Amino acid sequence: MVRAFPLRDFSAGQAGRADQSGQAPAQTFSRDDVEQARLSGYEAGYKAGWDDAVRAEREDQARIDAEFSRNLQEMGFTFQEARAHVMNALEPLLAGMVDKVLPDLVAQTLGQSIVEELLHLASDVADAPIDVVVNPSCRAVLEPMIKSATSVPFSLIEEPSLAEGQVYLRAGQRERHLDFAGAVDRIGKSISDFFSLNEKVFQNG
């Protein structure tokens, strides 16, 4: 019978050499660890996406605000230009009204105003005549107008120092003053001042 030779077992030696190599055994993760890592990664990604969205929204809002502000400035400038053009067109029209229309209107209403004042004075001074002091150039127009409108006795007196739209009514110690010319001058000055101010505002922005 052939004698069997015993075979050497190398498994123990290999295990010893693996332990002596200094390499740590492979790390293992539990299912909870994997789930926690997955959730952390999801939250980090979500937060990064949210931050990007917020930053983009702020940038868009800043751009919109800047564009809106610029549009408002352009609209304001356009409005000022349009307003200046309108005012420049109105100025000669209003000035012409002051120079031509208002004096004619004064001439038409002056007689009626004198009659109304004559009636007020006549009620206080009985039958005493009332002096109507006017510019000489107004006599031809006012005298027949007053005579046809009232029976109150009056005396028409010419005074060259008065403007055409000025009239003084005197009855004893009482006196009334009608100054349509001054009113026309004040209207003209107000219009002139208004357009001067408008021009300064436009030039100064």
Image (cartoon, grey):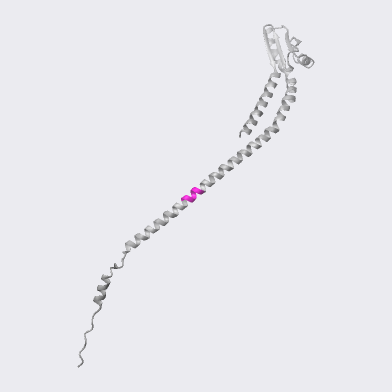
* Quadrant in which the N terminus appears: bottom left
- Say how many tags the image has: 0
Region of the chain picked out in magenta, as a range: 54-59
Furthest residue toward right: 140
Q: Main secondary structure of the magenta part?
A: helix
Q: Quadrant of the C terminus?
A: top right
Q: Choose top left, top right, bottom left or bottom right for residue 153.
A: top right
Above or below, 96 against 27 in this view is above
Where, by quadrant of the figure, is residue 139 drawn?
top right
Which residue shows up at 73% across the image and 11% down it? Answer: 132
Residue 93 location (% of width, % of height): 72, 30
Height in image: 2 above or below 147?
A: below
Q: Residue at x 66, y 34 (%)?
A: 84
Q: Is residue 55 magenta?
A: yes
| Residue located farthest toward the bottom when viewing the structure as drawn | 1
From the viewer's perspective, tell me whether residue 187 is left or right of residue 73: right
Depth check, front residue: 45 or 143: 45
Q: Nearer the viewer, residue 11 or 93?
A: 11
Residue 13, image x and y in percent?
24, 76
Against 43, residue 130 (above or below) is above
> Residue 12 falls in which quadrant of the image?
bottom left
Q: Is 140 situated above or below 22? A: above
Residue 39 in the image, given as x and y percentages of width and height: 37, 59
- Tell me what residue is drawn at x 37 percent, y 60 percent: 38
Q: Nearer the viewer, residue 32 or 141?
A: 32
**Residue 190 inside the magenta-drawn segment:** no
